[in-house]
Image: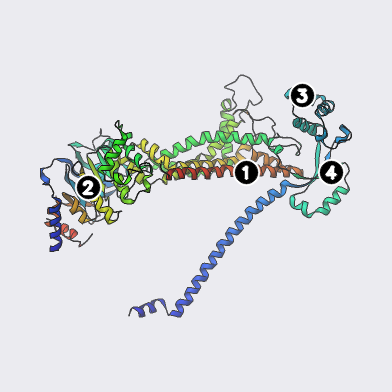
């Protein structure tokens, strides 16, 4: 009886088998689709990385405005110069204006050999890139490179890595061979510090209020909805807000004019403080939402057990809820900060500098940041700017990688500590 | 049915229960009505709870027995939308009077939950934290030892007090939660199905512990296990749920009387397993 019923309701054995095969095929079909999607995503990411790496290595044709042998005959490299020769070359060949400025910044006798060589290269030899090839081009277009070199005089071919220690420590320069990202890197770090100082305490504080204290009222629901919406507002809008509020309306504060009577060169609101506050507002909703998620992850049973032994709300939050959720709050914050690190548009809107060679020294300094630098360089027509833009991208990516792995490391370490005996 | 009644009677004999009615009334519920938003969860619950006795709340799912339990130390305050009318008197004082701080109540009326929920800290800190925040000035080592001994856990954990409490077994965790509650020296301990997540052996140990603890503490226990209610409690309150899903108190009596001679038909049906 039972068997017959099964047969009538699920069909014959053969039919069952056929259906089984069909279901198995469908299941494999979807698996293939998902593998395909993952592959495409990975390929695009690889393509991005390859194209960046392709730009930072390769052949470059360089022409010196002044040949080294013209400075001291019989030499072919600045490394062969003695100390006195370096100083002499600098004094004799620098134009009087530049010499005065150089002596003013740091007397030639006090400069190291390495600094002097950089000085001579930048102001006297003045090498320039005639043409450059990427890594792929350097390998595949040997004929083209040979043909190009055949028509050149006074120039030489080198295989160059555009990312060098000097690239990290040099300041900006009109010549891509000498240009570095020190000011941009420092600017980015300053900005991130301000962003963190604004967004972390306020963000975590609001999240604690909304998650632990707020009643389920219409007003609070509306607040929550608005925070969600704010996190999706395009970053350029925050730039406009920053321009109107921090740069213009609060100029007296953000320019630092309220602290000093000396009208220095930065006496306007386009400072690190404005930039950091703007990005702070940008990541604030993200930090609030991330922190709320972290707090939601704390089981209510923990809160109840805390209240059960006579703890107040604050004691419960401080001693039970926060220790358990802190790793996730921190991770969420670091991820939000790495978003701020990559932001360009709002900083361009509030008027970040495009060319400064002075290191930011306080929150009232003018600034530029890595993404802005990359944007500026990649917009230039000369080919070799693209190479240094790629090199700067690598630096930015490494910085982001360090931040994100730092987040993961911290999370694992705190989670481990949580599991271990106290 | 006859056989089962006999065994129950024997159990009462074996446990040597004290005469319930000689005891002082420590908590009194008067016409307690509890709403969750617009939902009427419990209506007109009135019952006494006697000092240093075990009172069991039984009844089918959704009858509001846990809700009533939580109203005794104002845990319902934590639930959004929960409101209460009527009076819960503790030593004659209304716990819901305006000037009463629920934090103070919860120190005197501790709670043990259905799922063991120790703090994710060391065993030692699980005991000391509640005392610390309440301004304990005595010797912490001594507090930890006596609390764990009272909860019959000391011998099992005395060598690993620094270990994280979450590494204990479920039964040990629940006894740790009881020890943690004892450490703040409450008068009353509310237990919300304390053994329902435990295996029979761990359950047995919790039951033994309850019988031991009632020498010093007043205990109110919610349980789904009628055997448990009959084994550990002196008084039993049977809650029912009406057609609007509102819970109400169907019958309250000394445990022996309620199980052997229920006055209401519903009670008899429930304890004999006809529904619920």
Instruction: Give the percent coordinates (x, y) of residue A396.
Output: 63, 42
The reply to whether dot 1 and dot 2 touch (C-beta < 8 Å) is: no
Q: Nearer the viewer, mark 1 or mark 3?
A: 3
Pointer 3: what residue? A109
Please state the chain letter of the residue tagged with numbered disc 3 in the rendered image: A
Q: Nearer the viewer, mark 3 or mark 4?
A: 3
Q: Is residue A367 left or right of residue B200?
A: right
Q: Nearer the viewer, mark 1 or mark 2?
A: 2
Pointer 2: what residue? B210
Q: Quadrant of the C terminus of chain A?
A: top left
Pointer 1: what residue? A398
The reply to whether dot 4 and dot 2 touch (C-beta < 8 Å) is: no
Kindly indicate whether the residues beneath marks 1 and 2 are on one polypeptide chain.
Answer: no
Q: How far apart in space, not on screen, are marks 4 and 2 (Cα)?
A: 92 Å
The reply to whether residue B74 is visible in this rendering is: no
Please state the chain letter of the residue tagged with numbered disc 4 in the rendered image: A
User: Label 1 crowding class (10 Å Cα cut-off): few <14, some 14-19, many 20+?
Assistant: few
Secondary structure of the residue carrying numbered label 4: strand
The reply to whether residue A338 is visible in this rendering is: yes
Q: Earlier in the sequence, mark 3 or mark 4?
A: 3
Q: Is residue A315 left or right of residue B72?
A: right
Kindly indicate whether the residues beneath marks 2 and 3 are on one polypeptide chain.
Answer: no
């Amino acid at each position: 009886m039972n068997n017959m019923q099964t047969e009538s309701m699920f069909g014959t054995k053969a039919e069952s088998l056929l259906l089984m095969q069909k279901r198995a095929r469908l299941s494999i079909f979807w698996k293939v689709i998902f593998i395909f999607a993952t592959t495409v995503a990975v390929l695009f990411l690889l393509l991005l990385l390859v194209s960046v790496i392709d730009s930072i290595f390769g052949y470059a044709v360089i022409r010196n405005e002044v040949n080294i042998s013209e400075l001291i005959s019989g030499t072919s490299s600045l490394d062969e110069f003695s100390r006195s020769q370096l100083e002499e070359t600098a004094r004799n060949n620098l134009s009087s204006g530049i010499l005065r400025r150089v002596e003013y910044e740091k007397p030639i006798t006090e400069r190291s050999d390495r600094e002097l060589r950089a000085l001579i290269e930048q102001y006297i030899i003045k090498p320039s890139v005639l043409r450059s090839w990427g890594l792929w081009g350097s390998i595949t277009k040997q004929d083209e490179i040979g043909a190009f070199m055949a028509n050149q005089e006074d120039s030489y071919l080198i295989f160059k890595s555009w990312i060098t220690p000097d690239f990290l420590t040099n300041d900006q320069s009109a010549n891509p061979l000498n240009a570095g990202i020190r000011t941009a890197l420092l600017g980015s770090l300053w900005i991130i510090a301000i962003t963190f100082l604004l967004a972390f305490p306020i963000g975590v504080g609001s999240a604690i209020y909304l998650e632990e204290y707020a009643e389920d009222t219409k007003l609070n629901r509306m607040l929550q909805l608005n925070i969600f919406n704010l996190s999706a507002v395009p970053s350029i809008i925050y730039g406009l807000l920053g321009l109107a509020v921090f740069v213009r309306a609060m100029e007296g504060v953000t320019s630092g004019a309220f602290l000093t009577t000396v009208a220095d060169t930065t006496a306007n609101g386009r400072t690190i403080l404005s930039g950091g506050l703007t990005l702070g507002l940008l990541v604030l909703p993200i930090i609030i939402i991330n922190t709320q998620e972290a707090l939601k992850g704390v089981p209510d049973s923990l809160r109840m057990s805390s209240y059960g032994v006579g703890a107040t709300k604050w004691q419960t939050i401080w001693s039970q809820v926060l220790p358990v959720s802190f790793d996730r709050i921190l991770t969420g914050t670091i991820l939000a900060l790495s978003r701020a690190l990559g932001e360009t548009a709002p900083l361009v809107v509030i008027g970040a500098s495009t060319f400064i060679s002075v290191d930011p020294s306080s929150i009232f300094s003018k600034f530029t940041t890595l993404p802005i630098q990359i944007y500026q360089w990649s917009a230039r027509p000369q080919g070799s700017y693209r190479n240094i833009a790629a090199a700067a991208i690598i630096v930015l990516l490494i910085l982001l990688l360090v931040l994100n792995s730092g987040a993961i490391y911290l999370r694992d370490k705190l989670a481990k500590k949580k599991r271990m005996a106290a | 049915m006859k056989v089962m009644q006999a065994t129950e009677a024997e159990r009462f004999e074996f446990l040597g229960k004290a005469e319930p009615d000689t005891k002082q009334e420590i908590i009194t519920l008067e016409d307690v009505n509890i709403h969750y938003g617009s939902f009427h969860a419990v209506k007109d619950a009135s019952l006494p709870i006697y000092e240093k006795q075990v009172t069991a709340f039984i009844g089918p799912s959704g009858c509001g027995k846990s809700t009533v339990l939580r109203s005794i130390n104002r845990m319902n305050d934590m639930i959004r939308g929960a409101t209460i009318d009527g009076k819960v008197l503790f030593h004659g004082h209304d716990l819901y009077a305006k000037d009463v701080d629920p934090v103070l109540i919860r120190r005197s009326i501790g709670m043990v939950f259905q799922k063991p929920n120790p703090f994710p800290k060391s065993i030692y800190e699980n005991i000391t934290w509640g005392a610390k925040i309440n301004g304990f000035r005595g010797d912490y080592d001594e507090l930890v030892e006596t609390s764990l001994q009272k909860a019959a856990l000391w011998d099992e954990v005395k060598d690993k007090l620094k270990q994280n409490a979450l590494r204990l077994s479920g039964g040990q965790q629940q006894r740790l939660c009881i020890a943690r509650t004892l450490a703040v020296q409450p008068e009353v301990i509310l237990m919300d199905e304390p053994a329902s997540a435990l295996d029979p052996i761990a359950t047995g140990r919790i039951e033994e512990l309850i019988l031991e603890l009632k020498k010093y503490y007043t205990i109110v226990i919610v349980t789904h296990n009628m055997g448990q209610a009959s084994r550990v409690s002196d008084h039993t309150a049977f809650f029912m749920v009406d057609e609007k899903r509102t819970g109400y108190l169907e019958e309250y009596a000394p445990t022996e009387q309620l199980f052997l001679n229920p006055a209401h038909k519903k009670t008899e049906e429930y304890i004999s397993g006809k529904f619920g």
